[in-house]
Image (cartoon, rainbow, N blue to C red):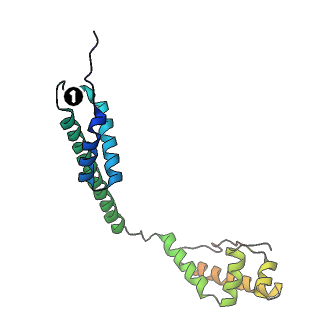
Amino acid sequence: MKRSMPRFDIIGQLGSLRRYAQSLTRDSADAEDLVHDALVRAYERRGTFRSGGNLRAWLLSIVHNAFVDRMRSRRSEAARIEQAGYLADAATPAPQEHSVRLAQVREAFFNLPEEQRSALHLVAIEGLSYQQAANATGVPLGTLMSRIGRARAALRQMEDAAPGRGKNHLRIVGGEQ
């Protein structure tokens, strides 16, 4: 015994569905998406349509419900984003020791004399060899090496003076020696 499904004249209803979706969304692209979603729902739930019922009214109610679901989803998403913004604004970075130490090392680096800071930056941060850094600054290689040595010594002295720090806590990093 085959169950006969009512024949859907969907094509004849598209005009009404599009007009209603357009009036709900006020945007033709959103209206087309809404009609598409509603038709997918109608197809998936075609077994719930009562034989002899008003197909147009049934489809329009699906369009309406799909629109309401979209609006709820958008409001819910907007509320989640807003709440996440509040949480992000309320979060403050913890005053962890390494953050404080990094700020102190940075300050000490910027307090170095310009020629020492420049030489150390080129070798330790930019990764230039001593010779490349000497060429870039226009000083002899020995002068550059002396400046780097004095800069590193000053930073080590700052590090050794810090409470709870052992000698030579800072690593020597940089280019070729």
Question: Residue 62: where, in percent of width, then height?
Answer: 23, 39
Residue 161 visible, this orientation: yes
Identify which residue, 96 or 13, lies in the foreground.
Answer: 13
Quadrant holding the N terminus: top left
101 versus 50 height, above or below: below
Of the pair 155 and 15, the residue shown nearer to us: 15
Left or right, 62 with reference to 140: left
Among the 4 quarters of the image, the one containing residue 39: top left
Q: Quadrant of the C terminus?
A: bottom right
Q: Could you tell me how many numbered marks the image carries?
A: 1
Using the rendered image of the protein, determine whether residue 163 is visible from the camera's viewpoint: no
> Left or right: 84 with respect to 52?
right
- Name the outermost residue toward the top: 1
User: In the rendered image of this protein, does residue 7 appear above or below residue 38?
Assistant: above
Q: Name the amino acid type tagged 1.
A: Phe
Relative vertical location of residue 21 with respect to residue 111 in this rendering, above or below: above
**Residue 153's image quarter?**
bottom right
Q: Residue at x 82, y 79 (%)?
A: 131
| Residue matched to label 1 | 49
Report the residue at 71% width, 83% height from top.
119
Count residues near mark 1 (Cα–Cα under 10 Å), then give few for <14, some for 14-19, many for 20+.
Answer: some
Measured as percent of width and height from the top left, residue 83 is found at 30, 60
Instruction: From the top left corner, tell me how far across and down residue 77 is, in percent.
Output: 31, 54
Residue placed most toward the observer, 85 or 100: 85
Q: Residue furthest left?
A: 53
Residue 68 vertical position relative to residue 105 in the rendered view, above or below: above
Nearer the observer, 87 or 148: 87
Q: Residue at x 43, y 71 (%)?
A: 95
Instruction: Please give the name of the residue rendered at 28% of the width and 58% of the height, measured from the top-left corner.
Output: 79
Q: Secondary structure at mark 1?
A: loop
